Amino acid sequence: MNVTEFFWLNGLVGGALIGLAAVIMMLSIGRIAGVSSIYASLFRPKSALVWQWTFIGGILSSGLLYQWLYRPIAVEINSNIFLLIVAGLLVGFGSRLGSGCTSGHGICGISRLSPRSLVATAIFIGAGVLTILFMRIVKGDI
Amino acid sequence: MRGAFLAFTAGAVFGLGLIISEMANPKRVQGFLDITGQWDPTLVFVMVGALIVTGLGYKLVLKREKPLFAQDFSIPTNKIIDRNLLIGAVLFGIGWGLSGLCPGPAVVGASTGSLSILVFIVAMTAGMRAFELTQKNT
């Protein structure tokens, strides 16, 4: 059994759950499920409301519960600390400067056919693709 | 309070979606971005699944006068594609490509106790704070 062959279904179902989460947020409190914005607000005392804490807490809890009740979560990541720090800084700064990330722009924004989100998503995917290509060239894979 | 509880539920469903689709696994995300190598199309299916549900869901929900537990819908109204959006997206994309991580998956990953994820999150938080500092100066 080839894992990638069947993973399209996991992707579809997982994606549908992410979509459902976004709809729950909009229906219940009228908010965009943009993780970068919500996470960032936790560090701005004036704007940190309870729902932001519970939303992030919910994501964390799902991970904890999943591992406790079911099985480990695979996190295969480059452990180069310098790389992680640079990447983190870029993701943090970039998501704020660009007013969103994969959930905020990629899902919530595109669902509303927001021109800003369509453009932002195309650009960050493009930048990601070029970055991986660059990394492969540097490693000598190409 | 009910709003906060439903936000928790949304977060939990969101996290589960990331785990099931393995978007919480940086390797699978980078596989999608690796178009010249072993391309992994999983992220495409994730987006399709999400956009179908949210596209339909938002349409229905936004017909309402107001949300269930809030005074109104807080939806961004800015439509201008400005320099900040473009540069921000580029920077975000580079960081995303380098690590295969973005905020949501990072929070899920934190639940595993991964040191790499923790390092990323600290740096991500610092990057966000750095942005706030640039705002104070304008």
Image (cartoon, coloured by chain):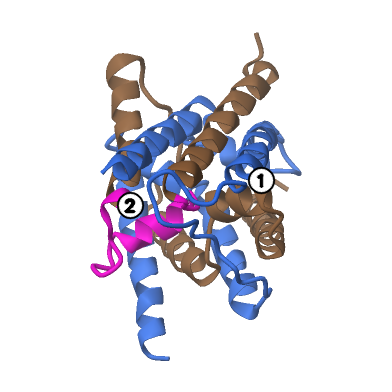
Residue occupying the point 23% across, 67% down:
A45
What quarter of the picture does the N terminus of chain B occupy?
top left
Q: Colour of chain B?
A: blue
Mark seen at residue A52: 2
Q: Determine if the magenta segment contains residue A107.
A: no
Q: Residues within 10 Å of mark 1 (few under 14, many from 20)?
A: many
Boundaries of the magenta span: A30-52
- Image point 30% across, 66% down: which residue? A47
Instruction: Decide whether residue A43 is among the magenta residues.
Output: yes
Q: Split into 4 quadrants, where in the image is the C terminus of chain B?
A: bottom left
Q: Which of B37/B118 is in front?
A: B118
Residue at x 65% of width, y 71% of height: B86
Give the residue pinned by disc 1.
Answer: B33
Nearer the observer, B53 or B102: B53
- Kindly indicate which chain is depicted in brown in the rendered structure: A
- In which chain is the residue bearing label 1? B
Image position of B108 with respect to A2: above or below: below
Badge 2: few (under 14), some or many (20 or more) residues near its Cα, within 10 Å? many
Vertically, is A7 above or below B133?
A: above
Q: Is residue B4 left or right of residue B48?
A: left
Q: Quadrant of residue A36?
A: bottom left
Q: Measure the C-alpha gap from mark 2 to mark 1.
A: 30 Å
Please, is residue A22 above or below residue B89 in the view? above
Q: As shown in the figure, which amino acid type bears the numbered disc 1?
A: Leu
Q: Nearer the viewer, residue B91 or A48?
A: A48
